[in-house]
Amino acid sequence: MTSPALENEVALIHYSLSTPAGINKIAKGGLEWIGSHSAEILLACAGAFLLYFVMVMVRRAFTRLKNRSDDPISFATLIGRTASKTTHLFMAIAAARLVVGYADPPALLFNTIHFVFTISAVFQGALWAREFIIGLIERKTGDDGSGETLSNAMGLIRVLVTFAVVAIAAIMVLDNLGVNVTGLVAGLGIGGIAIGLAAQGIFSDLFAALSIIFDKPFRQGDTIQYDTTMATVEHIGLKSTRLRSIEGDSKIISNARLLEMEITNYADIMQRRYSLPVGVIYQTPPEKAVRVPEILQQAIESAGAEFVRAGFLGFGASSLDYECFFVVHGHEVSEAAAMRHKVGMAVLEAFAREGLEFAYPTQTTFTAAPDGSMIYPFTRPQDAAEAHNN
């Protein structure tokens, strides 16, 4: 909204300086004011200097706070960074504005100081807002290890934030100066929509990259799985992400498409739980079948993994089925795979020592005569026993 008082101040300043008579009148009035209010003017100048000195000291204190903080992204550092961006011009004008009323100045001088203070305050506020917003973004990102990607993203963010705050400040100043900014705001809005529609794909990948940096679903060096591909993240760009698959292929996928998929990140896994199904033949003696969970536990623990549980699962088509669970600690995929291999070999050796046989799919065919009686084209068990006894 336009300030009528500020409009009047601008009009008065312009009118007073537009004619020689006005300038002469201003000069004469100024000399008279100085002569009749010399003591008040000196007092106001001393007060302004004191206020300026205090503001400079406060600014230095905040600067020391910023430099003294051990955490470069702490909230105290952020406050110090923001306050250290206070300009000397703003402090001088603010000090003059605070004490100008004590000297009972002419209306033109008072309005001029008030006008300059309003403009400087708007742009100083924009400068504070820019530094605070950028500091919050850096505080949010922290040290994500993305290096070049974060540097490029922060460069772009600084440009966007600077443009936004300066544009808002300029519109506020023009509006207070009496300029009709409705058309300007509408034009900027329509232009922004047009640019956004024209570069929709680019902005989609760009904001996806910012989402990756801020939300951190994965980082550079992490091993992830998306869709049916498992790969290691090599580089996170502003447009796409480059990965290296476990087969060695280089995979390049746009950031927007990558975030649309379900991603499994293996970097944050500190322990992995594995299931190991085991089947033994039906000819296994019951006393050995009872000991299978105990044998599995001993084999898993001897391999160095953490045993969870094991037990009988059911009667399979060709086997007595068991299932056991064990845990491998550590986030390295290669180490987990090596431990799983070690556990499997330990189970194989334990079963060999105990005389337990792994089952595999088998079928037995029986032949029957037309009347349903069994025909044995092979030696029957009882005949084999009689032949052995004889």
Image (spheres, rainbow, N blue to C red):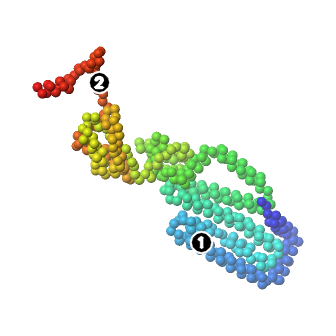
Looking at this rendering, what residue extends furthest in the bottom direction?
A: 39
Q: Residue at x 35, y 42 (%)?
A: 323
Which residue type does callout 2 highlight? Thr
Judging depth in this view, the residue of 79 and 346 nearest the camera is 346
Q: Residues within 10 Å of mark 1 (few under 14, many from 20)?
A: many
Q: Is residue 363 above or below residue 183?
A: above
In the displayed structure image, the side of residue 185 where residue 150 appears, left or right: left
In this picture, residue 200 sits left or right of residue 297: right
| Quarter of the image where the N terminus is located | bottom right
Q: Residue at x 29, y 15 (%)?
A: 371
First along the sequence among labels 2 and 1: 1
Mark 1 = which residue? 62
Mark 2 vs mark 1, foreground winner is 2
Query: Eyeballing the image, is 219 above or below 73?
Result: above
Residue 199, x across and y down, in percent: 63, 45
| The furthest residue to the top | 370
Q: Residue furthest left?
A: 390
Task: Compute the Cα span from label 2 to label 1.
Answer: 91 Å
Q: Looking at the picture, which amino acid does disc 1 mark? A: Phe
In the rendering, at what x and y percent does residue 349 appear? 25, 44
The quarter of the picture where residue 163 lies is: bottom right
SS category of the residue bearing label 1 = helix
Quick check: 361 above or below 228? above
User: Residue 185: where, in percent of width, then height?
Assistant: 74, 53
Give me the residue at 56% from left, 68% from top. 76
Q: Nearer the viewer, residue 9 or 303?
A: 303
* Residue 20 screen position, x and y as percent: 87, 70
